[in-house]
Amino acid sequence: MGKAKPDRVDVCIIGAGASGAATAKVLTERGLRVVALEKGPWRERETFGGDELANVNRYNLWPDPLLNPRTLRQSADQQATENLFCPVPQMVGGGTVHWQGWLPRFTEDDFRMRSVVGELPGTTLADWPITYHELEPYYDQVEWAFGVSGQAGANTFEGPRSRGYPCPPMPMSRYAQKFHEGCGKLGWNSFPTPQAALSRPYNGRPATVVSAFAQQHGDPTGTRSSALNVFVPDAVATGRYDLRPHCYVREISVDERGRARGAVYEDADGDAVEQEADVVILACGAVETARLLLLSTSERHPNGLANGSDLVGRNVTFHEYSAAVGLFDDPVYAWAGGGYVSASTFQHYGHDPNRGHASGGHIAGAGVGIPLPINWSLPRKPLWGSQAKQLDREYFNHSMAVAMVLHDMPQHDNRIDLDDTVTDAWGLPVARITLQPHDNDLKQGRYLIDRAADILEGAGAHKVDKVYADKVTGNCSHQHGTARMGNDPETSVLNRWCRAHEVDNLFVVDGAPFPTATGANPTLTIMANAWRVAEHVASGRAT
Amino acid sequence: MTSSIDHLGTGFFDAHQRRTVAAAMARMIPTDDTPGAREAGTVDFVDRYLAGLGAIYAKPDGSGFETLEGKQAWAWQQRIDSLRGTYAAGIATLDRYSRDTYGADFADLQDSDQDAALQALESGADPGAADIAQAQVIRHGGPIEPALQQTSTETELDFVPLLAMHTRQGFYADPIYGGNRDRVGWDVIGFPGPASLADVHTGRYSVLDYFADDRRHPGQQDHPDG
């Protein structure tokens, strides 16, 4: 109580993860004054450690489901139940705090999948309103600002690039070597997975420490490339980035004309504050962005902000991660480097009508534990007993996964809305996910897992377990599509600049604008698109 | 190396509960030609966990444990209370079954009878319990969602799968939590883990030696900048 209302600023960004931090860097470097409101803490690197129990089992990085529940159901006639669906760390840096950052670019066809595939009944497959070529300069900006290690041209399915990567590929792990061998045997292209890590010192930053605690662990050394380690410091250095942690935005406020006025939030002391801004940019992740829009009801926007079309929250996609697991005679140490310093193939990524399903996905080698056998299992593996122990011993040093990123299809009825009974620890309705996989998702998933198994067999695995995805569980933490961009306000929430059709000073820069999920890890494209939008916002204000 | 924790008066279990849980955990990861849950002290791990909010998060430099506050402390108290209930009821059920079937407390049964009792409780009176247990374990990182995501929570688990999970945690988690005594869990699987949490925290811990002998990818070109 009694707090002075903060000064109005040029831009208010909700969220300080991959997209919010990238946006903040661009805007502040272009001279704009930015306030960022981040729900979670602003953690220094000293607060992170190599502790699987804390980081994976005890919600040190994941949202605690008792505080931040979500609910899930398969169809609108079911009662949703609580489920920690598609969690992402809620803190400065967001998902980039605990990722290992596989950063492939999308392909040219990813931006025109509806044209490539044609009509696929039951889906809302759509072309993007932008092309690969429009986004390419921003891919380049992000790769060079962020520090990505990779080999230009090694992925023969990639579109044209204006230049290579700033750093050579990360050193080759034994599991990457197996992956290359398997693809080589099959005559398939493979390439070092482009990664958010430094294979050598770059931009005043030291090379990334190769630990066993990486994927799903924070980085105590500060040497990985993340929004926290790169974009946030860049924005802070301008002196124009006012990043406020522990500030939970409850709604986007609107003026009498229905334009965004600012954000109403609960600050670290529990006080309600309104931050006004000329432009409001949502960067909460596709699930929470949709939730915030739906929470922001007003006379002008009774169904939620920018939701006159009833499209906010719809067409949500999550990918799905699954794998074949191979056992080798020689050690592969697939925990080394955290299990994700690896190699990839796009051989089964593009659409091929002869396969009997639409599109495809990224396939790559990976570890099975993260890194320990605390949080993994195998089909039909007993839960406990001497056989379970024996399998731990056999598999730990001698097995690896070959995994897929499923390109799940957008569907009108797959959506985020507000749960009508469950609230979070702040008293607000939580996101309710309604989700049913499309038949194409299951077919494509089986195909990709079969190809993953081919690679393991090609590499000489003497035992291969295939794990088909029989549903979409949100286990990738990838989320997209809840506020599609498009040229037609009847079928999209945002225009090609990711500005709301209905609210001309409201933008969305996370995965929500993606009309399709694609079959690749989304964060590079999320950051590149955020950069593109931020340049547009800055240019609009400069003129 | 790490010493086991003196639990007298500091843990959650009474002596009988502690003995029962230790015996059950010894069946989860049995001692064979290599150490098992008993040698790793997994009962110390769970006893300490359930004792309160003092051992939820190790400080990342290994210098002690974090103090929980606010909403986080509230959530953890809910969780610990729930888990205590699962353990107390589970131990009582295990003993009741053991006495009814074998005429002795669980901890006094021979190994094969202990296994049978745990299996009986795992499949349980609820015909769906085994399926749920299996689903939970798979959801907790099994290959249906291989190792990469945690979408289930401990409080959703029945006693036997919970015990199995805590045994794994106590066997393989960092020794600072009271289990994995002298890093025996890591030795069993051949993990060259860090000497301490501080080793990771300072960046001293590198496992580059476990990468390929030739660390250049096939066909890798020299970077233009050298």
Image (cartoon, helix red, strand yellow):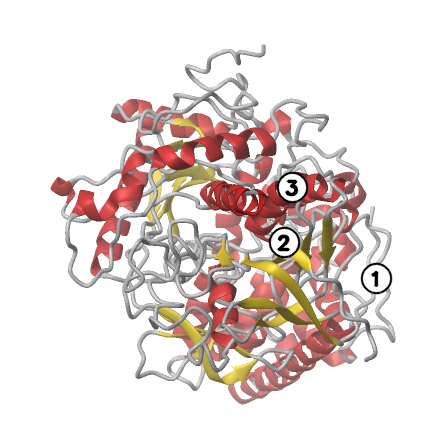
Q: Amino acid at mark 1?
A: Ile
Task: Give the structural element (helix, strand or loop) at label 3.
Answer: helix
Residue at 54%, 85% (x, y): give it.
B97
Q: Chain of mark 2?
A: A
Q: Nearer the viewer, residue A351 or A395?
A: A351
Give the distance between the C-alpha atoms of the residues marked 2 and 3, in whole angstroms.
10 Å
Q: Amino acid at mark 3?
A: Phe
Residue B5 shows which numbered tag? Answer: 1
Quarter of the figure with the C terminus of chain B: top right
Q: Nearer the viewer, mark 2 or mark 1?
A: 2
Residue A16 shows which numbered tag? Answer: 2
Q: Nearer the viewer, residue A83 or A317?
A: A317
Residue at 27%, 38% (x, y): give it.
A109
Residues at marks 2 and 1 on the same chain: no
For label 3, count other residues whose C-alpha is less than 10 Å away and answer few (under 14), some (14-19) or many (20+).
many
Measuring from the top left, give residue A135's x and y in whole percent.
Answer: 41, 37
Q: Are marks 2 and 3 in contact (CB under 8 Å)?
A: no
Residue beneath disc 3: A231
Give the distance between the C-alpha atoms of the residues marked 3 and 1, in whole angstroms.
43 Å
